[in-house]
Structures are given as C-alpha cells and as structure tokens.
Image: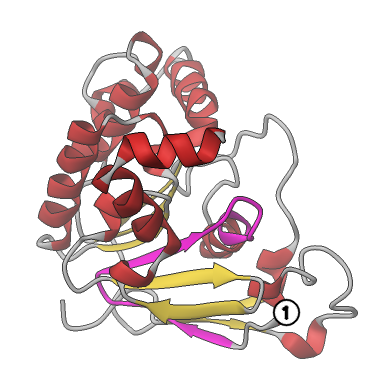
C-alpha cells in the first residue's frame, strides 16, 4: 500500500472546554495532539478502562460508522452509550478513498446480527445476509459470527476498525483471523484494532500504540504488558498460579 485511507487523527484541543471531564480526562485523550496511523495495521493496547475502545469508537464514528458497529449504512441504535469525543477529532485523509469499510465491535455483534435480520425482513433487494456468508449470524457462535464477517463481508480496499475482535476466539481462530487480516492487507486494506491478544499484535511491521496512565506511546510487541504477562505465565504456568494464590 502506497498510502493509507486514514493518515492520522488530531484532537481539536482548542474546542475542549475542560480536560477534567470525561472522556477528555482520560490520559489517552488529554495527551493527544496528532496520532499518526500505519498504512496497513495499527494496534491499540492497554489495560481495561485505559480508553483504547473509547478512542477507537470515536475514530469510527468520526469516519461515519454506526457507534454500535456495522457499515456506514447501519443506522440502528440499541442504547446511546458512546461519548462525544468524535466531535472533537479531525481525521486526516489522503486523496485515495476507501471503497469498503466496517466497524466491528465484539460486544455488540448480537445487535448487528439482529439488525441484519430486521433489514432482511423488509421487502425489496437481495438478502443482506448473503454478504455475510448466507447463514444467520445468530445461528453461529459468537466467535464464528465474527470470523464470518471478516471472511465474507470484508471485501478489501477498505478501512476496517475492530474493537477487541479476539474476545470470543480460541487461539487457533485468532491465528485464522491473523491470516485473513494478512489477505485483506494484500488487497489494499487498512486496519485499526484495539486488542488484548499478543497473537494478533505479532502481525509483521504493524504499529502498536500502548495506552497507559501517562498517555500513549509506540512500542514493540515484546515491550507490551500483554506479551510480558503471557510469556511469564506460559514459561511456567504452575509457578505463576502458585504465586498468585499464595
């Protein structure tokens, strides 16, 4: 890929009334000025509550995606829970345009699956579910439905924003997701991914932004807390558990 569909994200700091209020009080936001993105794969990692999903959601909404997930054509709302951070972001886009895109949130896949069935119940047009493999996402496990979206709905030449896609996936399915991600990168796709999975983070040449109480910084896989904790545990699981339970 010669250039990304989304080059960087800027916070309009002059429009923020107070950095003491949510979500601007989150270190990842309060320290944000301009965040450059990798043209292929950018990961966001951090502890629960660090704000990585809040930031990713705001980028997705600013791009035009539905806050609960799906394509730009999805306009359903189960519960209004997203922050207003998207209104304070400026997306820096190069001239080339994405022809496809999807915002995948593991926690709201059920809502997306329900919306697809609702739309297909209305008359006119080919079934939407055909673009997702032809089988109801509700008839598959959580992990299977996420993989089905990536395998069948992601068509390449697109911007794909994924929020913890590994949440319902076994280790072998995470590797399958990694393979599919690589295929789509080869089809001129760009990914922004919030994750806890060291397996996904191992994608070659990707950028990894680690979010901490000090803000956000670019790190190597081997320097992420996720990798270090997983490595210590797998090197000697019995000893690690014994120490934990002392």
Q: Position of residue 113 (x, y in %)?
A: 45, 23
What residue range appears in magenta?
34-54
Using the rendered view, name the quadrant where residue 11 is placed. Answer: bottom right
Q: Residue at x 55, y 77 (%)?
A: 216
Q: On the picture, is 245 further left or further right than 8?
A: right
Quadrant where the C terminus lies? top right
Q: Residue at x 36, y 71 (%)?
A: 223
Asked whether residue 45 is drawn in magenta, I would say yes
Nearest to the observer: residue 182 or residue 221: 221
Q: Residue at x 34, y 14 (%)?
A: 136
Q: On the picture, is 179 further left or further right than 11?
A: left
What residue would you read off at disc 1? 30
Quadrant where the N terminus lies? bottom left
Is residue 152 in view from this perspective?
Answer: no
Using the rendered view, name the quadrant where residue 166 is placed. Answer: top left
Is residue 223 in view from this perspective?
Answer: yes
Q: Is residue 179 depicted above or below 218 in this figure?
A: above
Nearest to the observer: residue 214 or residue 55: 214
């Amino acid at each position: 890929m010669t250039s990304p569909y989304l080059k960087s994200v800027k916070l309009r700091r002059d429009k923020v009334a107070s950095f003491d209020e949510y979500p601007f009080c989150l270190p990842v936001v309060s320290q944000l000025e301009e965040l450059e993105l990798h043209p292929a794969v950018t990961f966001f990692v951090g502890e629960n509550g660090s704000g990585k999903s809040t930031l990713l959601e705001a980028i997705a909404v600013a791009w035009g995606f539905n806050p609960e997930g799906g394509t730009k054509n999805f306009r359903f709302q189960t519960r209004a829970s997203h922050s207003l951070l998207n209104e304070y972001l400026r997306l820096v886009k190069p001239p080339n345009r994405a022809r496809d895109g999807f915002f995948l949130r593991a926690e709201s896949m059920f809502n997306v699956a329900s919306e697809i069935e609702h739309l297909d119940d209305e008359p006119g047009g080919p079934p939407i579910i055909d673009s997702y493999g032809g089988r109801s996402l509700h008839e598959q496990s959580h992990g299977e439905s996420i993989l089905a979206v990536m395998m069948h709905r992601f068509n390449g030449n697109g911007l794909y924003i994924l929020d913890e896609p590994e949440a319902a996936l076994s280790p072998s399915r995470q590797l399958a997701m990694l393979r599919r991600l690589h295929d789509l990168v080869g089809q001129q796709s760009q990914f922004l991914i919030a994750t806890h999975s060291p397996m996904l983070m191992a994608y070659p040449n990707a950028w990894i932004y680690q979010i901490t109480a000090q803000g956000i910084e670019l790190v190597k896989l081997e320097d992420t807390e996720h990798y270090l904790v997983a490595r210590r545990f797998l090197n000697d699981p019995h000893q690690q558990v014994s120490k934990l339970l002392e």
